[in-house]
Image (spheres, rainbow, N blue to C red):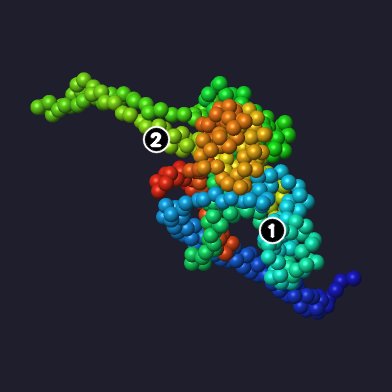
Amino acid sequence: MMMSKESLNNCDNRNRPGIVLLITLVVLVVLSTLAYILTGRLSAHRHRDQYIIDYSQARYGCDSAVKYALATLENLEPEVISRPDEPDFSDLFAMSDEQYEEMLDQWAARMGIVRNKDSDVDEDITDVDDVNEIDDVNDINDVIGFTEINDPNAVEIQGPYGPPWPFVTEPAEFEVGTAKVKIEIEDENAKYPLGWAVLADTKVEREAKAGLETFCEWMEFDKERIDLLKDDLKKISERKQFELEFKPTTTTVRTPSRSTSSSGRTTTTRSRITRKTISAAAQIVEQTSNFSRLFHSSLIDTEALARPTIESETRKESALKYMGMWATRKVNINTAPRHVLEAAFAFGGDADKIAQEIIVRRRIKPFKDFKELRTTLLGYSDSIEKCEKYITTVSTCFTIKVTAVSGVAEASAIIAITKDGKKIQRIAIINS
């Protein structure tokens, strides 16, 4: 049955609003999508521009802090403190969280405070003459008022210079423009010199290997991780081996002498021989610079070394924290922890016994020089004598870590320096 023309027109009229509505919806969806894409791109662009501004501010703050730190280093005179009747920092790296918390409680008791994470009350101690006489932290509540510390990081074990190991001074924090800056100075002679593992002297190869393995075992490395580290170090030793002792050397340099004839032509005559003496100090600086680059290159898997062995609210331990990556040659017996001391005295024998004696005695009075160490530990004088070139009582190598944060951007720099009195020699700077 055929529909009339009038009927068809009526049907079209009835469908037209639906078609218009559908087209309108499609247009709105397209426009909304375009608006969303445009808004996203504008937002990303704004974020990118803001990050560039933040990073510029952070980089400026970091660079300014680096200049400030280097300018004030001459006045840095790190002094080791005595710690009679106080916990020693030496074994913190090997403690479980429970042992560490117990030690913090003992340390807090000696400072006259009780660590209580469940309380927000602070009350000063005023009714006791000598808090050092209190051995049991639980006895304090029965006799005196106390200060309760809610922040687990509020109490820290003092290091050899006062601030927590390996800091030489308390970290400095300040603002440069919109950037919040932090400067930390670490004692590199308090760490295990990685250069010992690639020594050129084959006479002490067995002792050097024993020292490395002692260090790794203290850091709870399994055999696979130790072997991987040895493989990395082997790659470095194939390129360059580490020297401990240097003597001035004289090199001969031939310089061709040139003369110009009357016709304007340059002719070469006989060579001129000159001799140049390179001091031991200059050779040490060159080696330090070379090995600093090698130890911070892709030849060493630093990510594996930085992997935490212990991580909690109050601390983070890793092998990298205790490794000297700046080609240091000696360990400071006044500032090194137990496993670093044992690695150093592996070159002479009786390493564990000597390390224990040093830890006990330096708490009362830091060692002044090598002679005092030898006379104080007279029973181990032969072993100590063999280690003279591996140890020191005064640190000369330090790293300055600068971190600047502005908004969401962060800039950092690490400067390694050697300091002999007022004389400062820059080893390297790493920016990131």
Q: Earlier in the sequence, mark 1 or mark 2?
A: 1
Residue 29, disc = none
Would you say the residues marked 1 and 2 are in contact, meaning their CB atoms lie under 8 Å apart?
A: no
On the image, the x and y values in percent for residue 20 come to 73, 75
On the image, the x and y values in percent for residue 230 come to 63, 30
Asked if residue 350 is positioned above or below residue 165 in the image, the reply reads above
Q: How dense is the environment of label 1, judged by Cα within 10 Å: few (below 14), some, or many (20 and up)?
A: some
Q: Residue at x 55, y 21 (%)?
A: 202
Q: Residue at x 49, y 64 (%)?
A: 176
Looking at this rendering, what residue extends furthest in the left direction? 262
The answer to whether residue 59 shows anywhere in this view is no
Residue 282, disc = 2
For mark 1, what is the residue? 132
Residue 419 image-quadrant placement: top left
Q: Residue at x 49, y 57 (%)?
A: 62
Residue 188 image-quadrant placement: top right
Q: CA distance from mark 1 to mark 2?
A: 50 Å
On the image, the x and y values in percent for residue 84 come to 63, 51
Q: How dense is the environment of label 2, judged by Cα within 10 Å: few (below 14), some, or many (20 and up)?
A: few
Q: Nearer the viewer, residue 229 or 410?
A: 229
Please state which amino acid type lies under the numbered disc 2.
Ala
On the image, the x and y values in percent for residue 380 come to 61, 30
The kind of secondary structure element at disc 1 is helix
The answer to whether residue 304 shows anywhere in this view is yes
Please state which amino acid type lies under the numbered disc 1.
Asn
Asked if residue 359 is positioned above or below residue 175 in the image, the reply reads above
